[in-house]
Every structure is written in C-alpha cells, then in structure tokens.
Amino acid sequence: MDYFLIIRFFGLLIVALYAYWRILGLNVSRSKMAATIIFSVVMSIPLSFVPPLYELLFLVSVGIFVRIVARGKLSLLIPTVIIAVGISLGMDRLAVSISFLSIFIFETIHFVTVGTTFIDIVAPNMLDILSAILQSVVFVLTIVFVNFLFKIQRLKKGILFIENKEALRTGLIFSVLIMITMSAAGIFSEQIYSDAGIAFWTIYTLVVINICTLGIYFWWRHHTTALYQQRIKERDMERHISQIKELSESNDLLSKAVHRDNKLIPAMYNAVHDFLSRTAHVDTETKGLAIRSELEEIMQERKHMILQMQREHKSLPSTKIERIDHILSYMLLRAGECDIEFDFVLAGNMEDIAESVISKARLETLLADLIENAIIATSHRTYRRILVTMGVVDDCFEITIQDSGIPFETETLSNLGIKKHTTRAGVGGSGIGYITIFEILNERNASITIIEHAPETYAFSKSIKIRFDGKSEHVLNSFRANELTS
C-alpha cells in the first residue's frame, strides 16, 4: 500500500469538496466537514490503487458524495463538481511546482557549495521519510492556496454566475483540460523509462496545469466583475425608471393644476377688472376683500401642492455617503411636516473630499444640528424655505445653510458656542446644538460666517457658512450691527 498516494488523494478530496461548498457560496458546517473528512479517508485508499487514470474515479466519487449530502440539482451539481475538481488538481500542481522549485534551488546551492547533491548523500531509509514530508508539505500548501483563493474579496462569495451556462463554459474547459493533462501524464509516465522523458513530461504537465489554474482564476474574476457591473446597471435602470415614474406623477399633478388655472386665471382677471371699474361704488371694499380672499386661497393651494410634491416625489442629490444621504432625507421629511420648502445643492464629489476633511460621523452631526436649527427658526414664518449647499469652493470644503426663519436673538449670538442657549426651553430645546457645532469646528480649525439679511432685501433672512479652511475664523455680518454692539 502506497501511503504517500493515500495522503495525496486525501488532500485532493478535502480540497475538492471544500471548493464545492465555497463555489456555491455555502458555509461549511461541522457536520459537513466531518462527513467530508470521513469520506476523504475512505476514498483515498481505493484511489491510490487506480493511477494513472484516477481522475475519472476522483470526479465520480466527489459527484456521488455531494449528490447524497447536498441533494442539489444535477444541472448545477455537475458543472460545480467539475470546476471544484479542476481547482483541487490545479492547486495541487501549483503546490508541487513550488515544492519542486524550492528543492531545485536547495539542491543547486548544495551542489555549488559542497560539490554533490543532497539526495546523493542521504541514506536510502531516509528517502521515504523525506517523501512523506514533501507530500505533507504539498498537502498543506494546497489547503493554504485554496483558502487564500476564497479570501479574495471578489471571489469570496463563490461563483455567483454558476447558473449562467455560457459564462461557465470557459471554466469547464480549463477544468477538463487539467484532468486530461493529468491523465495523459500518468499514461505516458508509465511508458517512458528515460530520465529526460520523465523530466519533460513532469515539467510539461506542471506548466500546462498551472496555466489552466491561472486561467480559472482570471475567468472567475472577469465574470464576477462583469456580473457586478451588470447588477449596478440594473439598479441604475430601476432607479431611473422610479424617477421617471415620480416625474410622470408630478407632471400629471401639475397638468391638472395648469388645466384648472387656464380657466381660473381668466376668471380672476375679469373679477379684478370688474372691481377696478367699480371704484366709485360703495361696495368696493367688500368686493375687494372677497377677491383678496379668493387669491389667498389659490396661493395656499399652490403652496400645499408644492409641499406635497416635495414630500411625496422630491429626490435630493446623492452624496454617495449613505449616512449623510439618510440624514438629508430625514431632514427633508422634517421640513415637509412643517410645510417648509427644502432644497439641497451638491457641488463636487463628496466621496473624495469628505473623509479627508471631516469624519462621516462628525459631518452627520454637524448637518443634523445646523438643519434642525434652521427648521425650528423657519417654522415660525409665513414664508418657509431652507437651502443647503455643500461642496468644494476655491479648493475648500464648504457647507452653507440658508433659511427664511426668524433672526437670532441678541443673547443667542453673544453666546454662540460658549453657553447653552435655547428659545425652546419649554418644548424640549437643550441649547446644546451650537455647543456641539463649535466643538466640531474647533476640532478641524474650521471657520464660520453668519450673515443676517435685512427684511425684504433677500429671499433668505440669514445664512450660516462653515468653511474647512484651517483658519478658525468667526465672522458675523448683520444688518443689526448697531443693535448687537450696543
């Protein structure tokens, strides 16, 4: 009984079955692993008696085992087993190549330094021990190589395109070619008695099989990448279809409004014209109030229609940073609940700049506090609008929050970032928002500029600009400068 062959076939079976589970993306449970080890021990003995054509029995035995244990579909089981066996044989030959190369280098160095090879001076009874050690090294290397293969990020989930027959074809060809090469080498090695012939077939086999093994790797990686790209395209297509649907719904809503306005606006025009022609009559005040009431009702309908579209259909630009997109979507929802028109403008690629300037967690906190303060201030006004702008300006990352809310109280501006101050003490306000904001600014040496606009001179009443310029400047520009300095 050839114990060396038993060790080798035991390793090949273990690797092939492990590769089978991993190709399908399945976790190898303890029960499966135990069954795999027992099966490999039992089958390694008969396999050692059937070289050089052991590949067929090897393939069939692995197929029967997984059919009994996994009970999968034959259309999926057969190609998976062929590829798993190809990977097992390929990794085995790769390990043998590295082992032979290491021995060759060692023997060359030994011959150059001592004048004879190591094999020539080893006692005959030591050769069996060295062969056993070499076989064990090959077994360990094969296990390491296969485990490393499935640690690669792109391959760790298995062959995701396993049910794509066209994509599988190349992998199956490489696997079958490995088995044919192994069988041919076994047949010819039995018929060749010269050292040169055996050396030629050994090197030829190792070269061909290693090329096929690399072919399996690149084939697997290529089709996995192609599958990921296809899924990204499908998701983009689904998103575009969803956006088209939302735009179509918004268009229908606006079409209905325009259709009604085509009748309503001429009617209101006639009412105003009639009102102006009656300026000498006593009922002009009553008539004017009625027309104004109707116009206010129309304006309120328009306002609610715009806000409804914002809540139901508005899509903010994506920063490609998931947690930032989530906080912006949440703030859009909060603004909608308060009948506030909320807009977000993105300038530049946030993925490349944000993390190098400020962490995602701190940016999330900063945005949440700034926008929440703007929502609170704006909810007290009749005209309610917030505009958030974020991006790179003059090679510097900036965040600007503009709102139409009530102005800061004098005490609030005096204590910004120094003391807790809130105008909502009775409704849950803690005053800690700007304390946190200024802590973040100080950490990054960022500058803040607060601008207050005089009433009716600008669409927004105030703006807060955060600029990560490393200058730590605090600037206040207000139309109430005399009041604030007194």
Image (cartoon, rainbow, N blue to C red):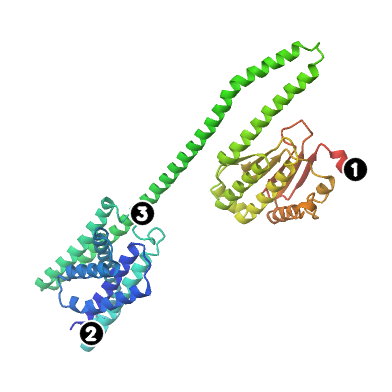
The numbered mark at residue 383 is: none
Mark 2 or mark 1, which has the lower sequence index?
A: 2
The amino acid type of the residue labelled 3 equals Thr
Regarding mark 3 in the picture, which secondary structure is present there? Answer: helix
Label 3: which residue? 224
Neighbourhood count class around disc 1 (C-alpha, 10 Å): few under 14, some 14–19, many 20 upward:
few
Write down the quadrant of residue 221 in the picture: bottom left
Q: Position of residue 375 (x, y in %)?
A: 70, 44
Element type at mark 1:
loop
Amino acid on which the number 2 mark rests in the picture: Asp
Label 2 crowd bin: few (<14), some (14–19), many (20+), radius 10 Å = few
Query: Is there any visible trace of residue 396 in the rendered image?
Result: no
Q: CA distance from mark 3 to mark 1?
A: 69 Å
Q: Is residue 380 visible?
A: yes
Considering only order in the chain, which callout, 3 or 2, is on the residue closer to the N terminus?
2
Vertical comparison of 97 with 126: above or below: above
Q: Position of residue 240 (x, y in %)?
A: 46, 40
Label ID, residue 128:
2
Q: Are marks 2 and 1 in contact (CB under 8 Å)?
A: no
Q: Amino acid at mark 1?
A: Ser
Total marks in image:
3
403, 283: nearer the viewer: 283
Looking at the rendering, in which quadrant would you find the C terminus? top right
Residue 122 falls left or right of residue 390 = left
Residue 486 numbered tag: 1
Q: Nearer the viewer, mark 2 or mark 3?
A: 3
Rounded to the nearest angstrom, the CA distance separating label 2 from label 3 is 44 Å
